[in-house]
Image (cartoon, rainbow, N blue to C red):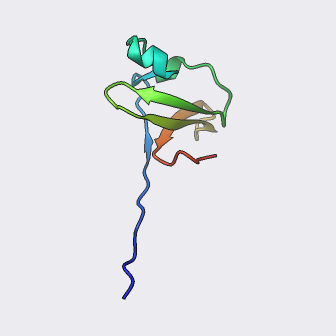
Amino acid sequence: MEKLVTIKRFVLPLKADRKVALSLEEKRRDQYVAVNTLEAPAGAHRQVWLEEVDFRLPLDKQVFTNENSSAGISCLVTDDLEFD
C-alpha cells in the first residue's frame, strides 16, 4: 500500500506595519521596513524576509476597490517559493 503525502501550503495577509527586509544582507544587518512603505505596483511579486522568520517568502501586493470606491491594499505571503 502506498502512503499518500499531503503538501500543505499557506497564504497569509500581512499587517501594514509588519517589517520586512528586501534582501538577505538587509536582514543580516537588521534593516527592516514596514510592508506598507514598499513601492511596488499592484500584482508585484518579490521575495522578502520577515522579521523573526529565518527564511524568505514570496510577497504579492494586491490593490482592490472597496464598496465606497476607496482603494484597499493587501500584501500576502506564502510558503510556496514557486509562487507566480
Q: Image quarter for residue 7?
A: bottom left
User: Foreground residue, 71 or 42?
Assistant: 42
Outermost left residue: 52
Outermost bottom residue: 1
In the picture, which quadrant includes the N terminus?
Answer: bottom left
The residue at the point 66 percent across, 37 percent down is 43
Position of 6 relative to 52 (above/below) = below
User: Foreground residue, 40 or 54?
Assistant: 54
In x, y percent, where is residue 78? 47, 44
Q: Image quarter for residue 19?
A: top left
The residue at the point 37 percent across, 13 percent down is 30
Left of 66 or right of it: where is 48?
left
In x, y percent, where is residue 57? 48, 37
The residue at the point 36 percent across, 79 percent down is 3
User: Foreground residue, 31 or 60?
Assistant: 31
Left of 65 or right of it: where is 23?
left
Position of 72 relative to 81 (above/below) = above
User: Foreground residue, 63 or 41?
Assistant: 41
